Image (cartoon, helix red, strand yellow):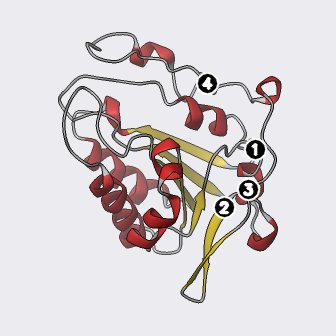
């Protein structure tokens, strides 16, 4: 099985602000070695949509994870990033129609139900902390009604499961520093810190 993990834009393109994808990096560390993994942080590429298109076409992943960190941009710009979530989901569905599309992240969690309604291409939404349930979502055969903290679709209907247990800070998985190298985030920021605090 193949998986593509994508950090969607978190700052106005061209602003030069790069924030390490802490949550996605932690989830990436939970992907079993038997799954072929590709990652893309759209914030570190000058033309990120071309990069996403190439990766989708070349890897034809079975699972695509879209991490939506910000509903609005950093660096003092006034805009909404809903269009980047919609565009990424549409591009994925058009180029890899059979892929399971997962979405999550802080921006997603704030408006999870509304975003699932606005972006019907998303199959499963992770609301809140995803570290405990994410490995279960990589299974071939899913019983979605038993997985806490997710939103999912069945026969055109949207379901929202109750939240699960909170994860202890002591149990957070390590970051995947190979797939997401901190060196890519060490220069250029004028507005925000390159590494967040969890």
Q: How many marks?
A: 4
Tell me the CA gap for discs 2 and 4: 21 Å
Up the image or down, 191 lies above or below 12; here it is above
Q: In whole angstroms, how far apart are the C-alphas of marks 3 and 2?
A: 8 Å
What residue is drawn where x is 65% and y is 25%? 175
- Crowding around mark 3 (Cα neighbors within 10 Å: few <14, some 14 to 19, many 20+) is few
CA gap, disc 3 to disc 1?
A: 25 Å
Q: Are marks 4 and 3 in contact (CB under 8 Å)?
A: no
Rendered view: 32 above or below 164: above
| Labels 1 & 2 near each other (Cβ < 8 A) | no
Give the number of the disc on residue 123: none
Q: CA distance from mark 4 to mark 3?
A: 19 Å
Question: In x, y percent, where is residue 29?
Answer: 69, 34
Answer with the quarter of the image where residue 102 lies. Answer: bottom right
Q: Of helix, strand and loop, which one carries label 3? A: loop
Q: Is residue 85 left or right of residue 15?
A: right
Dividing the image into 4 quarters, which one contains the C terminus? top right
Q: CA distance from mark 1 to mark 2?
A: 21 Å
First of labels 4, 3 by sequence position: 3
Q: Residue 84: percent from the left, percent from the top?
A: 31, 53
Q: Upstream in the sequence, badge 1 or badge 4?
A: 1
Residue holding disc 1: 32
* Label 3 or label 2, whichever comes before in sequence order: 2
Q: Between label 1 and label 4, give the one nearer the viewer.
A: 4
Q: Marks 2 and 4: CB-CB under 8 Å?
A: no
Q: Nearer the viewer, mark 4 or mark 3?
A: 3
Tell whether 68 sits left or right of 31: left
Q: Which residue is mark 4?
A: 198
Disc ID at residue 163? 3
| Circle 1 or circle 2, nearest the eye | 2
**Left or right side of 148 for 9:** left
């Amino acid at each position: 099985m193949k998986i593509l993990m994508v950090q969607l834009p978190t700052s106005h393109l061209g602003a030069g602000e790069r924030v390490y994808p802490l949550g996605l990096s932690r989830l990436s560390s939970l992907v079993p070695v038997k799954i072929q993994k590709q990652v893309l942080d759209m914030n570190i590429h000058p033309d990120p949509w071309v990069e996403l298109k190439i990766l989708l076409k070349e890897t034809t992943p079975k699972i695509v994870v879209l991490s939506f960190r910000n509903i609005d941009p950093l660096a003092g710009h006034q805009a909404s990033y809903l269009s980047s979530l919609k565009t990424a989901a549409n591009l994925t569905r058009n180029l890899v129609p059979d892929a399971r599309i997962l979405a999550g992240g802080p921006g997603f969690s704030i408006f999870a139900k509304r975003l699932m309604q606005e972006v019907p291409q998303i199959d499963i939404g992770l609301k809140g902390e995803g570290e405990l349930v994410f490995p279960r979502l990589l299974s071939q055969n899913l019983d979605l009604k038993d997985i806490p903290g997710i939103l999912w679709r069945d026969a055109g209907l949207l379901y929202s499961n109750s939240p699960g247990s909170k994860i202890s800070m002591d149990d957070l998985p390590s970051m995947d520093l190979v797939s997401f190298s901190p060196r890519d985030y060490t220069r250029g920021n004028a507005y925000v810190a390159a590494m967040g605090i969890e």
